[in-house]
Amino acid sequence: MHKSGKATDLLAQLPAGEQKGLPPVHLWNPPFCGDLDMRIARDGTWFYQGTPIGRKPMVRLFSTIIRRDGDDYFLVTPVEKVGIQVDDAPFVAVTLLVEGSGEQQILRFTTNVDDEVVAGPEHAMRVDLNEQTGEPSPYLHVRTNLHALIHRNVFYQLVDLAVEHELDGRRWLGVWSSGVFFPIGPV
């Protein structure tokens, strides 16, 4: 448990003032201070001490200081690093805006914490298949070592947009975005 026991104490450690963009959590190397009773569910709901965090601005602020090191997730400030649990991915891609078509198509996603991400060379999409059930789990790279699970309704939109394309000598159904073909599944 976090030494003070309060998630809001963690937020108080962030540098004050107007900031543009995300805090440079990748540059901060504070000491590990233990685990915080915080969990992000597969559906993107954030929980603190077993209770959903209902204030979206607070969730948004926490989402800006999350970092993944290996398989572990942390909330990081310049002076403190605390572990949190993430059931699947820390974000969920909840909407999709499609611009253009074909190889010039742009796929613009919005996450549950209002990050906008354009799929492309820097923000790849992938689909993992559950070995037992064959159920697909689609993901979008959001930022350094962090991904969003693509919501089922958004994935259905991607399937509707899918076209056939040969990739590495194999035929795939997939989608184009920013000049990159992202396979969804084999033909």
Image (tube, rainbow, N blue to C red):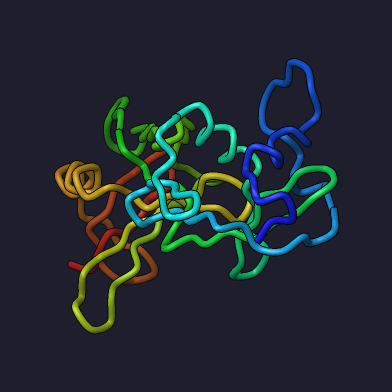
* Direction front: furthest residue: 4
Q: Position of residue 81 (x, y in %)?
A: 75, 54
Q: Is residue 123 left or right of residue 158?
A: right
Q: Is residue 39 left or right of residue 184?
A: right
Residue 18 location, quadrant:
top right
**Residue at the spot x=50%, y=36% of the render?**
59
Q: Is residue 22 above or below residue 143?
A: above
Q: Is residue 85 above or below residue 182?
A: below
Q: Is residue 61 left or right of residue 116?
A: right
Q: Is residue 114 left or right of residue 31?
A: left
Q: Position of residue 161 (x, y in %)?
A: 19, 42
Q: How many marks?
A: 0
User: Is 67 in front, or is 152?
Assistant: 67
Q: Position of residue 13 (x, y in %)?
A: 78, 36
**Residue at the spot x=65%, y=61% of the render?**
1
Q: Position of residue 73 (x, y in %)?
A: 60, 60
* Direction top: furthest residue: 18
Quarter the C terminus occupies: bottom left
**Residue at the spot x=19%, y=44% of the render?**
153
User: Is 43 in front, or is 148?
Assistant: 43
